[in-house]
Structures are given as structure tokens and as C-alpha cells.
Image (cartoon, rainbow, N blue to C red):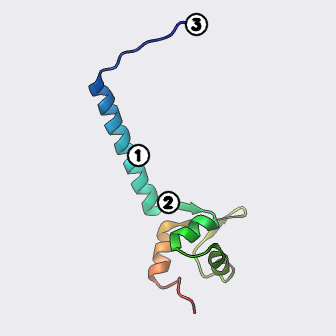
Amino acid sequence: MAALRVEVDEELIEQIARRAAELIGERSESESKDGWLRGADRIAAYIDAPRSRVYALVSARRIPVHHDGSALIARRSELDRWLVQGGGLRT
């Protein structure tokens, strides 16, 4: 099998790297604004609470989560709205 050798100009490599960084940044921004959190551990980390608290809130139907099979999932925007409205406070 013969090796294929390609020479690429350094400026082209820089352009590709810059564009890749832009795309990654755009993706990260959109995911951080309203992405899904999957699993009690990630939800707990997002709301800065222990995992047991997440399960207690789910059991009491006081937190905006959904189920994907047996996994808990939540949208960041729904959790943000819930927190702003005082949903995380103990009653």
C-alpha cells in the first residue's frame, strides 16, 4: 500500500483551526443556554444540590424534570426558571 502525502499551507491550517474553534464555541453556547441535562448527578450539579435532594424533589413533583426511560432529564432553561421562582427553597 502506497502512502499518500499532502502538503498544506500553514495559513490554510490556521484558517481551518479558527473556523473549528468558532464552530465549537457556537455549539457550546447553544448547549449551555438550553441544553438537556441527563441524569440526577448532572441535574444536582446544575442546581448545586445533593443527588438525594433531586430525588426528593422529583418524588414530591416539585422540580421540572422529565423521564427518558428510567433516566431523569431536565432542560437548563426550565431549571433556571424554577430556581428564579424559588422552586429550590424548602417549604
Left or right of residue 80, residue 61 in this image: right
Residue type pointed to by label 2 = Gly
Seen from this angle, which residue lies furthest bottom? 91
Label 1 crowd bin: few (<14), some (14–19), many (20+), radius 10 Å: few
C-alpha span from label 2 to label 1:
15 Å
Circle 3 or circle 2, nearest the eye: 3
Q: Mark 3 points at which residue?
A: 1
80 lies left or right of 67? left
In the image, is 54 to the left or to the right of 4? right
- Asked if residue 43 is positioned above or below residue 31 in the image, the reply reads below
**Could you tell me residue 20's position as x and y percent?**
38, 39
Q: Label 1: state its secondary structure.
A: helix
Q: How many neighbours does mark 2 have within 10 angstroms: few (below 14), some (14-19), or many (20 or more)?
A: some
Q: Residue sitting at 60 percent across and 82 percent down?
A: 62
Query: Residue 51, position in %: x, y?
Result: 63, 73
Task: Give the residue displayed 63% in from the left and 80% down from the top.
Answer: 57
* CA gap, disc 3 and disc 2: 45 Å
Q: Which quarter of the rendered picture does the C terminus lie within?
A: bottom right
Residue 5 placement: quadrant: top left
Q: Give whichever of 8, 35 is nearer the camera.
A: 8
| Residue 14: % across, % down | 30, 32
Q: Which amino acid does label 1 sit on?
A: Ile
* Residue on which disc 1 sits: 24
Q: Kindly indicate the quadrant of the structure image that contains residue 41.
A: bottom right
Pointer 2 with pointer 1, Cβ within 8 A: no
* Front-most of residues 12 and 60: 12
Mark 3 residue crowding within 10 angstroms, few (<14) / some (14–19) / many (20+): few
Foreground tag (2 vs 1) = 1
Q: What residue type is labelled 3?
A: Met
The residue where tag 2 is placed is: 35
